[in-house]
Image (tube, grey):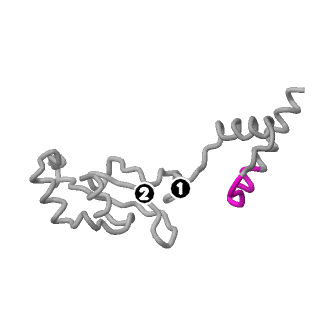
Amino acid sequence: MEEITKALYSNFVNTIRETADDIQEYDCENQQDYREIVEFLKHYKPEVNEAEYQGRKVKLGKPTRGDVKKFKVYVKNPQGNVVKVNFGHKGKGGEKTMKIKKSDPARRKSFRARHNCDNPGPRHKARYWSCRAW
């Protein structure tokens, strides 16, 4: 009996995943429908935040420590391609990275005015992410 239940659940999950783009609304008409959808939602993990960049899986929209600059983030550009956006000061040669001291209100105000952070531009540009960090 347990194998049948697992098979039915697996079939239900596969059906939902295949048609997830088409489903706008799911009506729970009885207790069994409610249990199925709750169980599905417990295990459902959409892959919206992951993409492939140069052959490896990356998280989209999450800034991390950079390799070329101080920070990097992977985002999709308007054409739908995944691009790496590098931003922040990295330093020269053996120097350490520059401390930004954004807790100082005067520096914060100056940075935001200099980079026009009231209108930061598109997500696939470094200015957007620098302004967001400030």
How many C-alpha atoms fall within 10 Å of the one at disc 1: few (<14), some, or many (≥20)?
A: some
Q: Residue at left 11%, top 53%?
A: 107
- The stretch in magenta equals 16-25
* Magenta run includes residue 18: yes
> Where residue 43 appears, x then y in whole percent?
65, 38
- Which of the numbered marks, if any, corresponds to residue 51? 1
Lower position in the chain sequence, tag 1 or tag 2: 1
Residue 124: quadrant of the picture: bottom left
In contact (CB < 8 Å): disc 1 and disc 2: yes
The residue lying furthest to the bottom in this view is 79
> Where residue 7 appears, x then y in whole percent?
84, 37
- Which of the numbered marks, if any, corresponds to residue 74? 2
28 with respect to 93 (left or right): right
* Magenta run includes residue 26: no
Q: Residue at left 31%, top 62%?
A: 128
| Amino acid type of the residue that numbered disc 2 sits on in the rendered structure | Tyr
